Image (cartoon, rainbow, N blue to C red):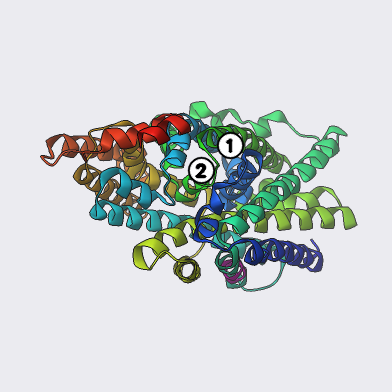
Amino acid sequence: MNPVLDLVAIALLVAATAVLGFAGLRISRTTSDFFVASRSVRPVWNASAISGEYLSAGTFLGLAGLVLLSGSEGFWFPIGYAAGYLLVLLFVAAPLRRSGAYTIPDFIEARLESMTARRVTSAVVLITGWMYIVPQLHGAAIALGVVADVPGWVGAVVVAVLVAGIVAAGGMRAVTAVQAMQYWLKLTALALPAVLLLVALSDGEPSFDPAMVFPQEAGPGGADLYETGSLLLALLLGTIGLPHVLVRFYTSPDGVAARRTTVLVVGMVGAFYAVSGTMGLLGRVLAPDLARPGVADTVVLALPSRVFAGVMGDLLTALVVAGAFAAFLATSTGLVVSLAGVISQDAFSGSVRSFRISAALCTVVPLAIALLTTPSGLVSSVGAVFVFAASALTPVLLLGVWWPRLTARGATAGMLCGAISCGGALVASALIPPEGWAAALLAQPGAWAIPLSTTVVVVVSLVDRRGAPARTERYLARLHLPERRADSTA
């Protein structure tokens, strides 16, 4: 590695990100610009931005590290991540766009006509977002610590300051441009080294045994059935509950554009997962010494210099480093812009000025947590966010879109049940020995926490004497009918 070249790559990325982000000062003027980019983002551009923010540190660094550690078993994560967007496409993309909301709490309040339900939703959204930002800041600390002899907190602070500045400067319109650019940078940053490494291996040096890549004991057949099933359920349903994913559909011009955007996203993230997984498999051949917890996440940073000496290896490493920082920035900006919209409307006036203040507040909290904690496995940290979102938010969102009898009390009880049961299980899993059924149920609570919260939502709604709001049928017609027809019934 060449630390100077790596730092130059980071500096160039930061400069390009800052130019795109602060250009938002010239084009973002109205509240709609800041919250939803005036609902004018076309499918290809929006899909690039969604893919950019969705492919986080857990994917760029952590997925390859997981495959390095566990072989083909690690591919359950990208399968769940990508397939989750199919559920978004089928069940929520177009209806949420037609709702006319700016944020998830906006949708819940409009659907249930309840400030209590809105406040609980806002709290769950903030917790989910902050849980997701912390691994991004940890990833920045890991990456900068690998390529330069600087304290780990430097990377976290650099990312946090830049993210807060970009979001405050231009809101959603500026963030869209940043994230779209960063998706293509991230894909290139892994695809080019992966292709060159495969070419080098095809020349016969170094030779490798296929059993090193797909050892029999590390395949899906060796995975624990409950933990694998619970993980997949959480990843599939968790995507529906991620605030930074859902808010992007509010930026589409209409429901049809939202659906087209989702189809493109499935292809884009699938391509990236194929490349990231390939890097992990190459790591099993070229860098088996890195297959240790806490070290495996650095494998994509180390691979180029293992095969290519001199300038070639240094340039490829610098490209990967830039892509890694793009991952931290893209996901963090998406999360902060979605959370800033929530805080701005719930705690302040909902103005542009309050949005900017909220962006700073939404960055300070996860930065403090990141500085006070040590990085663990990036993929497992992100997986915890998915299961929390799937337990606390997804049941209410799906039933809010599709079930007329949902009530405010049912939604509130379900969100609290999901958040407390899942959050409590994840905390408890860190305190008990990692063995036995009890440990498995706590470490992967999705298989029981999601049905539990869904049951609570349904039961409480059915026994709630207040019932659903009187205008429920009219509101649901707006969500499900084509735009022109829905408008005529509103």
Dominant secondary structure (helix, strand or loop) of the stretch shown in magenta:
helix
Residue 273, image quadrant: top right
Sooner in the amino-acid sequence: mark 2 or mark 1: 2
Can the viewer see residue 332 in this picture? Answer: yes
Q: Circle 1 sits on which residue?
A: 261
> The magenta stretch spans which residues?
155-162
Q: Nearer the viewer, residue 399 or 312?
A: 399
Residue at horizontal 66%, vertical 56%?
A: 326
The quadrant in which residue 190 appears is: top right
Q: Which residue is mark 2?
A: 249
- Nearer to us in this view, 303 or 238: 238
69 is higher (above) or lower (below) than 322: above
Quadrant assignment, res 150: bottom right
Q: For numbered disc 1, what is the local secondary structure?
A: helix
Q: Which residue is nearer to you in this view: 310 or 176?
A: 176
Image vertical order of residue 75 relative to residue 143, above or below = above
Residue 351 percent location from the top left of the image = 45, 66
Q: Is residue 86 left or right of residue 46?
A: left
- Residue 317: x and y in percent read 77, 55
Discs 2, 1 touching: Cβ within 8 Å:
yes
Q: Amino acid at mark 2?
A: Phe
Horizontal and vertical percent for residue 276? 66, 41
